[in-house]
Image (cartoon, grey):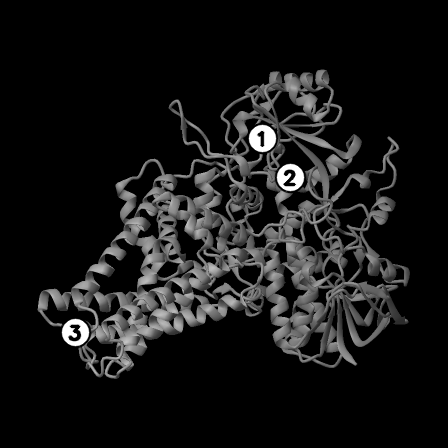
Amino acid sequence: MQLFEPQLSEEKSCVEGYQLISVLNVNEAEVERQMNICNACRYCEGFCAVFPAMTRRLEFDKADVHYLANLCHNCGACLHACQYAAPHEFAVNVPQSMAKVRLDTYTEFAWPGKLGALYKNNGLVVALASSASLALFLILVLLNGGSLFPGKLAGDFYAIFPHNTLALMFGVVFGLAALALGGGIVRFWRKISPAQLEAAVLGSSVAEASGAVLKLKYLDGGHGKGCNNSSDNFTLWRRRFHHLTFYGFMLCFAATTVATMYHYFLGLEAPYPVFSLPVMLGIVGGIGLLIGPAGLLVLNYLRHPEHGDKAQQPMDRGFIVLLLLISATGLALVAWRDTEAMALLLAIHLGVVMAFFLTMPYSKFAHGFYRSAALLKYSIEKRLPDNLKLGSD
Amino acid sequence: MIDVLVIGGGNAALCAALMAREAGASVLVLESSPRIWRGGNSQHTRNLRCMHDAPQDVLVDAYPEEEFWQDLLKVTGGITDEKLARLTIRASSTCRDWMRSHGVNFQPPLSGALHVARTNAFFMGGGKALINAYYRSAQNLGVKVRYDSPVDHIELAGSRFVAAHIPEREVDGTRLPAERIEAHTCVLAAGGFESNRDWLREAWGQNERGEWPSDNFLIRGTRFNKGVLLRKMIEAGADAIGDSTQAHMVAIDARAPLYDGGICTRIDCVSLGVVVNREGLRFYDEGEDFWPKRYAIWGRLVAQQPGQIGFSIIDQTSVGRFMPPVFPGTKANTLDELARKLGIPEDIFTKTVEDFNRACRVGKFDHTQLDDCHTEGLSPAKTHWARPITTPPFYGYPLKPGVTFTYLGLKTDETAAVRFAGKPSQNMFVAGEMMAGNVLGKGYTAGVGMSIGTAFGRIAGTQAAAAAGFSSSAVNEVQSHAAV
């Protein structure tokens, strides 16, 4: 029983050496309330990992709530199947309550802590504003240097920005972002991970969890027909568009990595021909990163109003649009790199990419990492003996 | 004119609608509830009991016809129609491919339900997911569905269906006029009368304590099963079957909502402790058999107690050994305190528990078997899992009767026809709770309601389509079943 207003509570992890049970905030308490209903029902066990993980518990503390929330893929299946969804007085909406807690996770575990607050207002506006301002900034630099329209440079980006300047700028920003995100994940993992981690189970758990991540197993609905988007009908399109986005992104990332290696190890400097490995990776990845986010954006707008947390829609859309801008500006750059527009296109593309890196630890980007961590915990946990012995079995 | 009119919107109704549509008939479904509450009690179900002679996808081992029949015979105490029961049993062995073709997904049994892994096929996501799938399929096939359309009167010509009447009503603030809907044939699948409080009162009457027991019943399912058509049909001369006090009735958490509490309001710790009434006295052997085999009798047992209330009492040793209840138990460090908190006489309650504790002969406790822990010299005895209740904290869960569905229904035959004075109607058929009493005179065994609803829904739909001039191979299948 909650003895005081949860909103007013502050987490204290340790007093005089005693481990205290953290008091749940409003969103966490709502997940706990719903999980107690779900645990007595269990009809949704076949859909995803959340419910089997739930059945291993009788009570849900703060760590459990965050773990379950990040296992949830917001597929919507359990909402449409729920006999206790509103207007039932139990008003169960697991995808929505989990989504709200996920935002708390990102905020709470972000490193450094204060910056976690950025999640709260990381909307479309912020993302667009930061990319626009960065792009503008780059354009201004160019104008000062007089090389915004420097004539045809045959795709030589480094004539605009010296390679080392770019490498330094992006290297530093990317490194800081990776550090911030990594710090958050580590903190999250420490909170949710099982006490005894046996090496024996780790290998197969990692393999299983990687499969679940790479295949987006839990967007298949448990029956292979997919998740719910606008109605109780199932669709595989969200999974497909997400695959295009993720693998498109990875190909673009690979393109950059290959180009970096060409530069430093093979002494091959850009511009690379269209049929070179880095450019081909970039084009294929870019197309994936164009179609994927475009599809996800359409699905997001068609999404059933009760799915997820409405307050997070700007964040979700902001992230999708940013991805879309990266691929669109990147592909435009390839298409027109031999024209006078190249310098401008380059400035815009770099601005967008920079904005992406800057917001990376505090944007929707983080969901993949927290979810992967939760899936790994799930794979480990289910290999450990279940200490509940519920009679009906 | 519509060929087949289906009145009702749950599993049986949709099975009928889909079969009739597949046979080529035009079909209109009238669901009395708003769309958001569609599906009647089916939205709370989770599986159907299936006969099978060998392992089948999610079903392990075998569950042959004879065993299913014996199970049914046992729970009903013989109050069943063997021909219709066996028809249901056989149909349950072949219906699942058809269900899958309409989008129903099956899954292995849920945790906490492994005891029915052999006999029951679980719907992935439960009954509401099944209902959603059927409605989607119906829409894709061109079945017309109307919500907020409660039929309150059937126009008959002798035993023939002529038209259904929907009264004037208000839906979302809009006044809708009364309607008369004609059809060539009609399937009645509008549920029992469990949410009609007046009818329950009338059926259960007043007891020797002057109480109206049914006033304390909770309804586990839909609030829309008022039995309006059931009553109209019986008044119009349709043959009825069953006892109006018989129902699938279990003991559920007394704090559950009045309607639609569904599965999660169950209390699964009865067999682990003792159950006392509000006077602090035990009244039945809590350890008679495994809980899944006994849950269906406890609703009536509690209904016979003063105030129609009971309290399931356990101690700390039982925590974590049963499915978690939706509401937390009342917790106390002493038996006195627990009695006070539950509002039962402290001295009597304490004596009941102490007498029980003294009578316990603890052998080797094993909750997964009919173990040897029992009482001696105690009345009523506890024959299994009897362990002294001595380890605080103690927990109490209040129990009330929870009605799932009533068994009073329309008499029917293997063609699912409504019958008048022993003769089948040529164009009216019945399915689901409205006729389940033909097979279930009393008692219950998990998942059999959906087996009956699916079997007779499909028969009714096929027959209704045939009576409207649309025959299909399925009719032959049904008739060959009927001929066996």
Q: CA–CA distance between discs 3 and 2?
A: 77 Å
Q: Which residue is mark 1?
A: A3
Answer left or right for B226 relative to B137: right
Q: Which residue is mark 3?
A: A270
**Mark 1 belongs to which amino acid?**
Leu
Q: Are marks 3 and 2 on the same chain?
A: no
User: Which labelled disc corresponds to residue B190?
Assistant: none
**Mark 3 belongs to which amino acid?**
Ala
Residue count near mark 2 (Cα–Cα under 10 Å), binned few <14, some 14–19, many ≥20? many
Q: CA–CA distance between discs 2 and 1?
A: 38 Å
Evaluate if marks 3 and 1 touch, with contact meaning CB atoms under 8 Å apart: no
Q: Nearer the viewer, residue A211 or A265?
A: A265
Q: Nearer the viewer, residue A252 or A233?
A: A252
Say if residue B108 shows up in the picture. Answer: no
Residue count near mark 3 (Cα–Cα under 10 Å), binned few <14, some 14–19, many ≥20? some
Q: Position of residue B477 (x, y in %)?
A: 64, 72
Chain hosting mark 3: A
Quadrant in which the C terminus of chain B is drawn:
bottom right
Q: Could you say whether the residue bearing mark 3 is in a helix, strand or loop?
A: loop
Answer left or right for A146 relative to A226: left
Q: Are marks 2 and 1 on the same chain?
A: no
Q: Nearer the viewer, residue B256 or A301?
A: A301
Question: Mark 3 against mark 1, which lies toward the viewer?
Answer: 3
Q: Is tag 3's residue or tag 1's residue first in the polypeptide sequence?
A: 1
Q: Which residue is mark 2?
A: B294
Q: Could you say whether the residue bearing mark 1 is in a helix, strand or loop?
A: loop
Who's the residue at 37% across and 65% down the image?
A133
Chain hosting mark 1: A
Answer left or right for A363 relative to A39: left
Who's the residue at 51% across and 43% down the image?
A28
The correct choice, above or below, for A276 with respect to A208 in the image is below
Q: Quadrant of residue A2?
A: top right
